[in-house]
Image (cartoon, grey):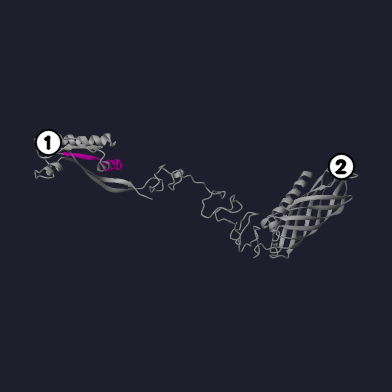
């Protein structure tokens, strides 16, 4: 029991510090006066000169006053009658009284209260007792309350415990509500904001609130101050449940976090969609190339010619395109010879594309037309020169990346 009294004292101390912020809240009623009856159970180990005390009854008066909504004190007087046993026979009823004072702590909404204090019991012998207990004031009307309590007692310096049960009736008076729970000034959650203005009526005890009774979020990150472990987060920054900035990994710097990026290592200049993949547009592309040859020759004389390089770069950039290389000759010579020569010229240019510029062979087709498609039919030396050629035109619809 001594341990019980020690823990109770510690609990009252913790409650005192925990509710310091609410100590200025006006109580619903400031005072009460009550009458009660009590059933008193004595310890069989209580030491007396002769015999022992048995259980008894009593009735009494109490007067209480509340400092705040949470804290109160009271004094009480109890007329007490206990059975006094000598051996196994009841010799008499021992009458006396018990007086004392208690400190009381009321829970929010007056759900129940804790109390503890000192009592002096004057019977055939006198005793000084410490007591703790729990009780409730039940509303029976605007100013009328029923009293219910259970208490435990311990004699200082002795090792015995008594118990009591109390039932009573109290009249409340004074205060902002005179005992009425519908008072306009009532603050049910003890946050310092009265219920009529409190937009967050069940704020946990000890949480800082604003003028509307809601928990304060000083850095506007959506995490209340009492939960915010990073209280000065910059505006607009994404935070986690602790109020701390979320670190986002974006390895290819395309604006899509790695966790959501389905296309890693996107080129820096490409526009991407919500999955981190390049956004493509369809585009029509084409290129035309003409290469001239010497008389009766199928040798590509200048394979590094800028126009040939441009053609090769086009083929590499648009990898889905294919090309048909057309070989031609001038009019002189037999028809069969010119057909073979035109095919040889087309094949020679294809070899340059494959061997020098690494274009895939299956993208290049050749065909010889001999002298059947002359560009100039005048029969002059200049006509023969322009007719000795290969020509190639590549066109198609390809997907090209959009730029950021």
Which label number is shown at residue 338?
1
How far is mark 2 from mark 1, CA to CA?
146 Å
Which stretch is magenta? 310-327
Nearer the observer, 223 or 254: 254
Which of the 4 quarters of the picture holds residue 364? top left
Tell me, yes or no, whether the highlighted magenta stretch contains residue 258.
no
| 10 Å crowding of disc 1: few (<14), some (14-19), many (20+) | many
Q: Nearer the viewer, residue 164 or 211?
A: 211
Q: Position of residue 161 (x, y in %)?
A: 80, 45
Q: Position of residue 242 (x, y in %)?
A: 57, 48
Relative placement, left or right, of 215 versus 35 is left
Query: Residue 106 appears at what percent x and percent y?
Result: 71, 56
Task: Check disc 2: other Cα within 10 Å, few if <14, some if 14-19, many if 20+.
Answer: few
| Residue at position x 21%, y 39% in the image | 324
Image quadrant assignment for residue 180: bottom right
Q: Secondary structure at mark 1?
A: helix
Nearer mark to the viewer, of 2 and 1: 1
Can residue 1 be seen in this snapshot?
no
Q: Position of residue 77 (x, y in %)?
A: 82, 57
The residue identified by callout 2 is: 88
């Amino acid at each position: 029991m001594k341990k019980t009294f020690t823990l109770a004292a510690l609990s009252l101390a913790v409650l005192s510090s925990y509710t310091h912020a609410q100590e200025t809240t006006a109580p619903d009623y400031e005072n009460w006066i009550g009458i009660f009856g009590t059933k008193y159970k004595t310890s069989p180990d209580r030491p007396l000169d002769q015999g022992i005390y048995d259980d008894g009854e009593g009735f009494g008066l109490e007067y209480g006053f509340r400092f705040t909504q949470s804290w109160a004190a009271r004094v009480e007087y109890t007329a007490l009658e206990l059975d006094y046993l000598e051996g196994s026979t009841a010799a008499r009823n021992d009458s006396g009284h018990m007086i004392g004072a208690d400190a009381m702590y009321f829970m929010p909404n007056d759900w129940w209260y804790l109390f503890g204090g000192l009592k002096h019991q004057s019977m055939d012998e006198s005793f000084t007792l410490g007591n703790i207990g729990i009780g409730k004031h039940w509303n029976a009307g605007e100013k009328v309350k029923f009293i219910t309590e259970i208490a435990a007692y311990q004699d200082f310096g002795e090792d015995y415990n008594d118990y009591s049960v109390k039932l009573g009736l109290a009249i409340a008076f004074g205060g902002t509500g005179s005992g009425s729970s519908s008072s306009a000034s009532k603050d049910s959650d003890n946050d310092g904001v009265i219920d009529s203005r409190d937009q967050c009526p069940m704020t946990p005890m000890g949480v800082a609130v604003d003028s509307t009774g809601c928990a304060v979020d000083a850095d506007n990150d959506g995490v209340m101050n009492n939960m915010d472990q990073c209280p000065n987060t910059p505006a607009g920054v994404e935070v986690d449940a602790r109020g701390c900035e979320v670190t986002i990994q974006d390895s290819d710097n395309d604006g899509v976090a790695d966790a959501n990026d389905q296309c890693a290592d996107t080129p820096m200049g490409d526009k991407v969609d919500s999955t981190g993949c390049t956004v493509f547009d369809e585009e029509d592309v084409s290129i035309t190339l003409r290469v001239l040859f010497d008389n009766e020759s199928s040798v590509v004389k200048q394979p590094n010619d800028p126009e040939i390089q441009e053609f090769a770069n086009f083929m590499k950039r648009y990898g889905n395109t294919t090309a048909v290389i057309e070989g031609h000759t001038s009019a002189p010579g037999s028809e069969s010879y010119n057909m073979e020569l035109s095919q040889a010229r087309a094949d020679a240019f294809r070899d340059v594309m494959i061997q020098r510029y690494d274009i895939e062979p299956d993208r290049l087709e050749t065909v010889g037309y001999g002298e059947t498609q002359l560009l100039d039919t005048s029969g002059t030396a200049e006509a023969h020169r322009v007719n000795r050629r290969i020509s190639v035109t590549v066109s198609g619809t390809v997907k090209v990346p959009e730029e950021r």
